[in-house]
Amino acid sequence: MRLYTVLWVAVAAAFGLTLVLDMTQQKTVSKDKIVIAFASMWAPGEPMMKGYEQLFRRFEQEHPDYEVEPRWDGRWVLSALRPRLLTGTNIPDIVNTDRDALLVLVKTGYTAALDDVIDRIAYPHDRGEQPASDKRLRDAFLPKILERCHYQAGDGHPAGLYLLPAGVWSGFIFFNRLHYEQLGLQIPATWSHFLANCRVIKEQLKDQGIAPLAADKDSYSTLWSQFLLNRTLGEQVVQRSVEGSGPRFDTDPRYRAVFQAIRDIHQDGFFMYSWRSSKWPDAQRAWTQGKATHLICGSYLIREILEYQPDPAIFRLGAFPVPMLDAIEWEAMGPVPLGDPTGVTATIAGHALMRDAPNRAGAIELLAFLARKESAAILSAVGKEIPPIAGAPFPAELVEIQDMFQTAQTVYKTGFHVYAPLWNKYQWKDLYRAFFMGEKTEHEGYLTVDAFLKSLQERTDAYHRAGGESARGGKDAP
């Protein structure tokens, strides 16, 4: 009975929250305006919310018949949307969320395919730009990013494009430009160059209390392995190793090179003091205070550190891609082609058109407006988002990677958690954490590179013997 009461209260609270959000966020709309309802993953006060607010006012100036009604639901946007969909009332025209989260709406048929829209609607020229009649809305987007917005919908709903990308989060090594300028360092293109930069920083700036690397325990540690594995072997090769049909972790020299490279950043004095017990976001704060030079993270970091208001006299942010390995001891194995050294990760947020959008025509007008280069420039400058729009300027902090990102031929599509979630959770995650956190032999769980790779392969073999991604196979393998 007590459990029933708790569940009833929880359901009532969720419904009440949605009702309050609806009542507090809906604006009084003039009778002569046509409303475009925009439900967003951003919350009031966030940089992206402020960027969108600017864009909506511009859109309304250019389209005086329309008024955009934003709902700043934050990360609860899909939860807030659920009762509206179930009751068929107050459904928004556009939902702004990330690609993976949208999948549930695509599979249940609540979103509209956009393939016809991007081929039919004219290219969204900036104000004053000379029109080109042969260009369509499709041409506004970076092709590789747009490809990622296609879904295999299933459940009786057709495959197709269901999201127009609006922003991208990607992983980089962020650095303090002032340290590089002080020491005359160049942005590294290879792993050995990166390690050399770290050694110079350690030797020259140690007395100032500055370390080469900042980290909060194992936060973002998987970014090191993710990038180095994809650059060295390629995404498909790694997946085949996990699935049991590719090279073995404990015999292929490329795997040894990757994890030796990760071990090599754990040299004495490379990480900031007490990093192994640091709690997020302490390392971010210390980094912006000039106490370390590098921090690996996703590009959302730029937004997160705005609240710290770093002193430009001691900190100026820059970024560069994780460098390619330049030394692999092939031994008896002949050299083989490596992965794409220019590949990028891309977590995509964007705009979906609801199938039952009350104002479909107005929503499409707004979608085209948001795909302008000048619209993307506002989200870039104010929201600090990487634009998926061809030719749009990047945030000032990421100018060095703009050309590389916009011309990247590989956008990594998957990760362990996507194609082998049980292997990721039960075979990889804790083992890799022990390897990453165990800097020295005296640390609990310390593993040499060879011991780590042997254990990883043994775990993978046991995982397949137990049935792979079946419920028991992934969980019960040691």
Image (cartoon, helix red, strand yellow):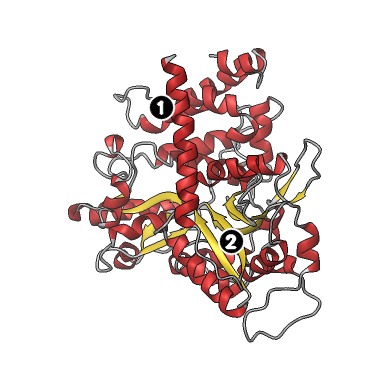
Q: Residue at x 42, y 23 (%)?
A: 6
**Residue 250 makes an appearance in the image:** no
Tell me the element at label 1: helix
User: Relative to the observer, which residue lies in front, 293 or 194?
Assistant: 293
| Position in image of residue 74 (x %, y %) | 47, 50
Furthest residue to the front?
Answer: 31
**In this orientation, which residue lies closer to the viewer: 337 or 436?**
436
How packed mark 2 is, by other alpha carbons closer than 10 Å (few <14, some 14-19, many 20 or more), is many
Give the vertical position of 141 relative to 245 (above or below): below
Percent position (x, y) of residue 183? 31, 64
Rate crowding at label 1 as few (under 14), some (14 to 19) or many (20 or more) other CA atoms within 10 Å. Answer: some
Is residue 377 among the parts visible in the rendering? yes
- 73 or 381, which is in the foreground? 73
Residue situated in front as seen by the camera: 29 or 331: 29
Residue visible at 68% across and 45% down?
337
Q: Which residue is mark 1?
A: 434
Q: Which mark is residue 478?
A: none
In the image, residue 403 above or below residue 44: below
Residue 405, which numbered label? 2
* Amino acid under disc 2: Phe
Establish if 293 lies above or below 375: above
Residue under the point 43% across and 65% down:
397
- Left/right placement of residue 326 relative to residue 270 reads right
Position in image of residue 194 (x %, y %): 43, 53
Whether tag 2 and tag 1 are in contact, CB under 8 A, the answer is no
Left or right of 294, for residue 33: right
